[in-house]
Image (tube, grey):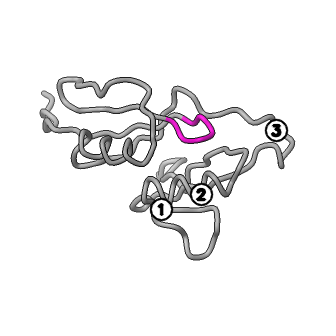
Amino acid sequence: MSPLISKVDFVAVPTQDPERARSFYIDTLGLQPDENARFDFWVGPTCFGIWEPEKQGITFAPQKNAHLVFHVDDVAAARAELEEKGVVFNAPTFDTGVCHMALFSDPDGNDLMLHNRYKPYEKQG
């Protein structure tokens, strides 16, 4: 029997200003624009779609405490590069003992994170 849910098709990113959001995700973060859809962009095999809730009759609210987590090879270096571009981080980078994480938000207030796991997973059992 196949699972009910087999994959994530895309992640929806709410915005009040799609052009500003597009610029942030493509020009600031360097995500790959989709050649067929102006407000879609890619991180590896994952599609991010910008949408305007208010155009659907839904009150806009940024996504909080459910961070979109972006893998980077070096959190400190990626953070420094983004800070040079004007990105403000919400807290100091923290070390969990197995990974580094740096929290920030997009211009609409959606929570984002830079992440790198530096310690391999340990086999259980």
According to the image, label 2 marks what residue? 22
Residue at 52% across / 59% down in the picture? Answer: 47
Amino acid carrying mark 2 in the image = Arg
The residue range painted magenta reads 105-110
- 2 or 3: mark nearer the eye: 2
From the top left corner, tell me how far across and down residue 115 is, in percent. Answer: 31, 39
Amino acid carrying mark 3 in the image = Ile
Residue at 70% across / 32% down in the picture? Answer: 61
Circle 3 packing at 10 Å, graded few (<14), some (14-19), many (20+), is: few
- Which image quadrant is residue 79 in? top left
Vertical placement of 110 versus 51: above or below?
A: above
According to the image, label 3 marks what residue? 58
Vertical placement of 46 versus 119: above or below?
A: below
From the top left corner, tell me how far across and down residue 56 is, in percent. Answer: 83, 47
Indicate which disc, 2 or 3, sits on the residue closer to the N terminus.
2
Say whether marks 2 and 1 touch (CB < 8 Å). no
Vertical placement of 36 versus 10: above or below?
A: below
- Which image quadrant is residue 83 in? top left
Q: Secondary structure at mark 1?
A: strand
Q: Secondary structure at mark 2?
A: helix
From the top left corner, tell me how far across and down residue 80 is, in percent. Answer: 30, 42
Residue at 49% across / 60% down in the picture? Answer: 27
Amino acid carrying mark 1 in the image = Trp
Indicate which disc, 2 or 1, sits on the residue closer to the N terminus.
2
Name the foreground residue: 31 vs 23: 23
According to the image, label 1 marks what residue? 42
- 2 or 1: mark nearer the eye: 2
Residue at 76% across / 44% down in the picture? Answer: 53
Circle 2 packing at 10 Å, graded few (<14), some (14-19), many (20+), is: many
Q: CA distance from mark 2 to mark 1?
A: 12 Å
Name the foreground residue: 115 vs 46: 115
Q: Is 113 left or right of 118, judged from the image as shown? A: right
